[in-house]
Amino acid sequence: MEADPKSSEDDRQRLESITQSYAAYQGLGVSIAGVLALSYGWIRLAGGFDEHHGWWLLAMQLVLWSNILLPRLFSRFYYRPKFGYVKPLSPQITDRQFWAVSAGAVVFGVILVPFVILPAWEHSDRLPFEPFTLAIGVALVGSGLFNLNKPNYKPYFLVFGLALLTLAFLPTFHIQTHKQVLSSWFWVAVGVFDIVFGWDSHRTLVRNLAISDREQNHV
Amino acid sequence: MSSLPDQINGLDRVIHEPARLAILTVLSACDEADFTFLLRVTGLTNGNLSTHLSKLEAARLVGIEKKFVGKKPQTIVSLTDSGRSQLEDHWRQLKELRKQASAVSRKALRLTFS
């Protein structure tokens, strides 16, 4: 180990960035949630979870909740024992913000989705595109373009954003109906995105913290 | 102004020792971290990390808090205020030394080829 001020300043910035986004880099839970979303999409594609039986709504809620709960569970039972705990100088998301978002998700999932949004989607066929898929696609493309010149640029944001935009316009060309896009292909795309995003985050964390696996400094 | 070798000899050896400097640099990038995290980032062994932390604690550069999470013991380490300012001073000194050393070597090169 050398005490070079320049490389140490770089190291410090790298460490600060890792500690700041430590929770976001714990991506295995997101990947598992992605597997659930992907499975849900495929099952819907294959004709499972028929809308007449009501199971689809329960399964969708499970997929939505897994995106919130699995990262927390993985953080507590996998990442903390294996990689340790660190409190950033200025945390990106506080516990209070996390629970506020979770409460919002409950309201969204339990009240707004079945009673407000789903009835509204019954009429979304009048639009030439699928609005929800379009919104998520625009968000991902926007995020991809915004980070284009940044060192932590992730090209898959742009790729998946463009894929979702393409899916959103399938009804325009009568290739798929609005419902087909939203109930199956949307989940397939989001599932694959979650798997890639989660795995990439996990890999970044391991690469930056698993120094002890590569070399042990006996000083 | 003291000479370059004097300034190098004058560096705080508690901080300047490479493993301890690594620990302090990690801690300067966060509010607090536990033993496992420090092990991961510094690549030190359990025994080495423990020894260096004891020395840093004795020099009042870090604070160590031992507690239990469930049934598991957890050691939380953080930089003290004086530790943070001493580390900043140390890096400032090193930068200054680097600048001076570069100037000395440039001068030596000029003398060699003149």
Image (cartoon, helix red, strand yellow):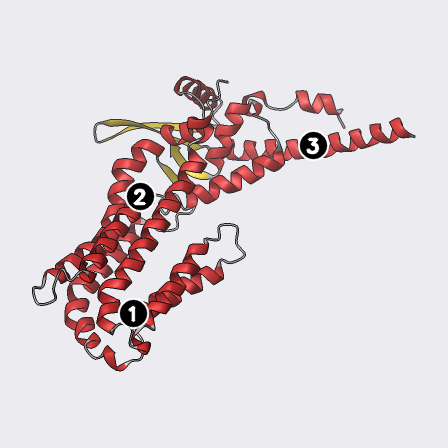
Q: Quadrant of the C terminus of chain B?
A: top right
On screen, B102 above or below B17?
Answer: below
Task: Look at label 2 and name its amino acid.
Answer: Leu
- Residue A151 appears at what percent x and percent y? 52, 50
Along the viewing direction, whichever of A152 and B101 lies nearer the viewer = A152
Query: For this view, does A140 lie left or right of residue B6?
Result: left
Q: Are marks 1 and 3 in contact (CB under 8 Å)?
A: no
Q: Which residue lies at the image location 70% right of the left edge and 24% below the top edge?
A: B7
Marks 1/3 same chain = no
Mark 2 nearby-residue class (10 Å; few <14, some 14–19, many ≥20):
many
Percent of width and height locating residue B41: 44, 31
Chain to which mark 1 belongs: A
Residue located at (55% from left, 32% from top):
B87
Q: Position of residue B99 (x, y in %)?
A: 72, 35
Q: Which residue is mark 3?
A: B98
Residue A132, numbered circle: 1
Q: Are marks 1 and 2 on the same chain?
A: yes
